[in-house]
């Protein structure tokens, strides 16, 4: 299979300031641990054009989830800016949809009542929210489970319910923190393809965290590779695969080369960390 890719056109699209939906500018963050400073983020910068799928990978504990927490407004950076459409925002709570690593469904609520939590918190019309959620259950693979409790769902179904809850927050920027990390390989592969179908329909701007380089390459328009803590951006890789993505693409030499480039960058990070210790 031959992939036709206009690299210049892609670079121009991604770097065009007019289409830049989210920009992270030189973010620094440190904590206190046993009365000593622990630097977590050391000048992280990244960009996501409108309607693109951007993934962040890096070693465990390097600060990826901290970065997402800062983007959402749950934390503030020590230095740096978070910009939406070119405007730096200090108060960001409610600006983006956010799905953390765990589904965090409320065990005493049925699926339908779990997924409308966002509209409920914001005081919206719950009858309309339930109607919208009900109409989306088939797309999210939950048809017939509106009245089920989380304990009655499989792991994959709980993740789909959590993602539907995030979609129903009606934010055009969504942050997904390792949503498939705890799933088995077959379920994970199925949900990757399903997520791309849903994203292709709604075209949100998505920022995504994973440890899986194949997942990163298969889903993304662009991948940022972070170093070990304190995190810095070590590489920015455009993924020149056509859309819609097909699973067969993962068997091509082009895909293997992308995976190798990501793995090599991660390995170089690890080597640099060992030399620095």
Image (cartoon, rainbow, N blue to C red):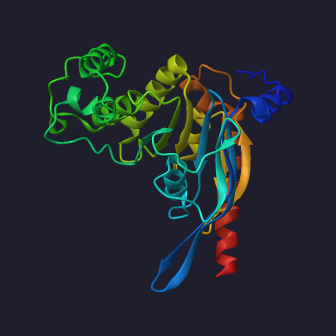
Going 44% across and 25% down the picture, which residue do you hit?
194
**Number of dots carrying numbers:** 0
Q: Nearer the viewer, residue 69 or 57?
A: 69
Find the residue positioned furthest to the bottom. 35
Position of residue 219 in the picture relative to residue 47 (left or right): left
Picture residue at 38% right of the left edge, 33% below the top: 163
Q: In the shown orientation, is residue 70 left or right of residue 232?
A: left
Q: Quadrant of the N terminus?
A: top right
Please tell me in which quadrant of the rendered image residue 51 appears: top right
Image coordinates for residue 192, horizontal then vertical, percent: 47, 32
Residue 152 is situated, as x and y percent measured from the top left of the image, at 15, 34
Identify the residue at image location x=54%, y=40%: 215
Q: Is residue 85 left or right of residue 246?
A: right
Question: Could you tell me residue 171's position as x and y percent?
Answer: 48, 30
Q: Is residue 262 above or below residue 110?
A: below
| Above or below: residue 211 compared with residue 103 | below
Quarter containing the C terminus: bottom right
Q: Quick one: 129 or 183, which is closer to the camera?
A: 129
Residue 219 lies in quadrant: top right
Query: What is the residue that sits farthest to the right in this orientation?
Result: 8
Give residue 213's position: percent from left, percent from top. Answer: 58, 46
Please, is residue 183 above or below residue 146 in the view?
Answer: below
- Does the image show residue 259? no
What's the residue at 79%, 32% (across, down)? Answer: 16
* Residue 210 visible somewhere in the drawing: yes
């Amino acid at each position: 299979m031959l992939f036709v890719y206009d690299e210049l056109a892609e670079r121009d699209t991604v770097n065009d300031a007019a289409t830049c939906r989210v920009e992270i500018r030189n973010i620094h963050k440190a904590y206190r641990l046993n009365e000593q400073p622990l630097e977590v983020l050391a000048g992280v910068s990244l960009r996501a054009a409108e309607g693109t799928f951007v993934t962040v990978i890096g070693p465990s504990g390097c600060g990826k989830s901290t970065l997402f927490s800062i983007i959402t407004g749950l934390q503030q950076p020590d230095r740096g800016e978070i910009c939406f459409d070119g405007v730096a925002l200090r108060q960001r709570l409610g600006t983006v949809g956010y799905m953390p690593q765990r589904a965090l469904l409320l065990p005493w609520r049925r699926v339908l009542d779990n997924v409308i939590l966002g509209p409920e918190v914001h005081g919206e019309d719950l009858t309309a929210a339930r109607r919208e959620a009900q109409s989306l259950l088939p797309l999210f693979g939950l048809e017939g489970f509106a009245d089920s409790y989380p304990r009655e769902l499989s792991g994959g179904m709980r993740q789909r319910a959590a993602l539907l809850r995030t979609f129903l927050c009606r934010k055009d920027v969504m942050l997904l923190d390792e949503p498939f990390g705890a799933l088995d390989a077959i379920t994970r592969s199925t949900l990757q393809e399903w997520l791309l179908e849903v994203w292709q329909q709604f075209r949100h701007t998505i920022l995504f965290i994973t440890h899986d380089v194949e997942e990163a390459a298969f889903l993304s328009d662009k991948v940022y590779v972070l170093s070990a803590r304190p995190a810095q951006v070590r590489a920015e890789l455009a993924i020149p695969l056509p859309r819609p993505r097909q699973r067969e693409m993962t068997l091509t030499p082009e895909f293997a080369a992308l995976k190798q480039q990501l793995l090599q960058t991660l390995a170089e990070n690890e080597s640099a960390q060992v030399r620095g210790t």
